[in-house]
Image (cartoon, rainbow, N blue to C red):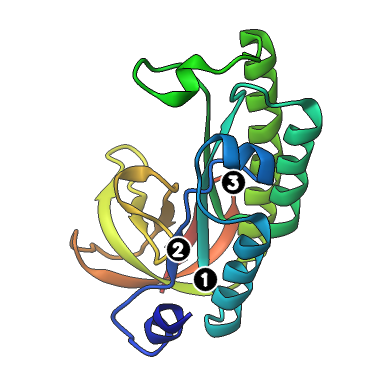
Amino acid sequence: EELIQGMAQLSKILPYFDIPLQHANDHMLALMNRRGTMQQVHTLIDQIRTYHKQPTLRTTFIVGFPQETRADFDDLLTFVREIKWDRMGAFTYSPEEDTVAYEFNGAVDEVIKQERLDELMRLQKEISFANLKAMIGTTIEVLVEGQDGLSGRYRGRGIANAPDGVDGLVYFSADRAIAFGSFVQVTITDALAYDLIGVCQ
């Protein structure tokens, strides 16, 4: 909590929190050898949202871990709906030699793994789209990183976009030439599932 509070007091630190949880069910977390409980996770997120007005929350989940039941997976879906993560990555479990889980019974069928991954990502796509739509009409600072040669539209990142396109981008038009690497103010006019569209001020 002290670190979270301290970050809120330092203007050069962005309120971007990547919390790789892997699952949202205490039994599954124990099987994965993850420290902490879901109650502690909820407390952590509450603290972040208490000290930071508009934090960006990112996480990563694994679906289809050995012994994961439909009820366990439903817990994960419920948690994702509750938190409404700004960014979320997910992948299916694959066994790796020399890990404890490699010896576990209760392997989940590959088809079921993929079905669960698809269902989770569909949910996150809806959440991401709703989160980004809420930004229409706001103005954000954008780091300019490139320009499309055909349309002339620029692309860049706001404070909620990690490097390398991991979190999507901000695409915007401008009535003047803008240098790559500069910061500009962009008013958001539209939203896609993972990207924002705007106009440079």
Q: Circle 3 sits in a helix, a strand or a loop, which is it?
A: loop
> Considering only vertical position in the picture, is 191 above or below 100?
below
Determine whether label 3 and label 2 are within 8 Å by CB: no
Q: In the image, which is nearer the foreground, mark 3 or mark 2?
A: 2
* x 45%, y 85%: residue: 5
Q: Tag 1: residue type?
A: Pro
Q: Earlier in the sequence, mark 1 or mark 3?
A: 1
> Considering only vertical position in the picture, is 136 above or below 69?
below
Residue beneath disc 3: 192
User: Which sits in the foreground, 152 or 146?
Assistant: 146
| Residue 148 placement: quadrant | top left
Q: Earlier in the sequence, mark 2 or mark 1?
A: 2
Q: In the image, which is nearer the foreground, mark 1 or mark 3?
A: 1
Q: Tag 3: residue type?
A: Leu
Determine whether label 2 and label 1 are within 8 Å by CB: yes
Residue beneath disc 2: 17
| Residue 10 placement: quadrant | bottom left
Residue beneath disc 1: 55
Q: Earlier in the sequence, mark 3 or mark 2?
A: 2
User: Which sits in the foreground, 82 or 124?
Assistant: 82
Measured in 3D between alpha carbons, the distance from the residue under mark 2 to the one under mark 1, in whole angstroms, is 7 Å
Q: Tag 2: residue type?
A: Phe
